[in-house]
Amino acid sequence: MTNEDIRLAGPADVARVKAVTDAAYHHYIERIGVVPQPMERDHAAAVAAGQVFVTGDPVIGPVVGLVVIEERADHLFLDNIAVHPDAQGTGVGGRLLRFVDAHARALGLTEVRLYTNALMWENQKIYPKYGYEVVERKVDGPYDRVHYRKLLG
């Protein structure tokens, strides 16, 4: 699969976007003590706003991974990346992260930013492998977040 297999989500994808997000984040509820924000997002509104891109798998289903991105004045904000547990470890997340980079460049942006919960330590091992660096750590309500950025060359 390539970046061409990643497409803008449509209204018919909303239930699948929610299902993949819930499946990817559910195991964190006990660890962090609250429901992760991506599980509580208004997925229909994000899809309607053109912020959600999805990829599928011929065996697992039409949506196995997704990104939710927001164009900002000076960067692209990666609000959420989720891969269904059945597809984790197959390269879907890496393809989605490369897509985000390409999308930012296509918009003329030179930086991607994201954050993850400090207790989601798996993510903290992944993002540096894709060129992200820690910018800061701060608490936002019940969430202890590690903020990252990636400068695009």
Image (cartoon, helix red, strand yellow):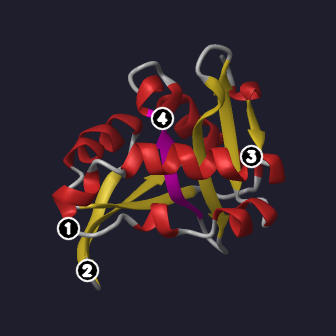
Nearest to N terminus: mark 3 or mark 4: 3
Amino acid type, callout 2: Pro
Left/right placement of residue 114 relative to residue 92 reads: left
Cα–Cα gap, marks 2 and 4: 25 Å
Q: CA distance from mark 2 to mark 1?
A: 9 Å
Q: Is residue 75 left or right of residue 107?
A: left
Among numbered discs 2 and 4, the one appearing first in the sequence: 4
Q: Look at the image and say whether residue 31 sits in the magenta stretch.
A: no
Q: Are marks 2 and 1 in contact (CB under 8 Å)?
A: yes
- The structure residue drawn at horizontal position 74% and vertical position 46%, both measured from the top left corner, is 13
Q: Which range is magenta?
A: 76-84
The quadrant of the rendering that contains the N terminus is: top right
Read off the residue under disc 3.
13
Q: Quadrant of the C terminus?
A: top right
Number of residues whose C-alpha sits closer than 10 Å to that of mark 4, classed few (under 14), some (14–19) or many (20 or more): many
Q: Quadrant of residue 31?
A: bottom left
Q: Which residue is mark 1?
A: 33
Residue labelled with disc 2: 142
Q: Horizontal placement of 83 versus 30: left or right?
A: right
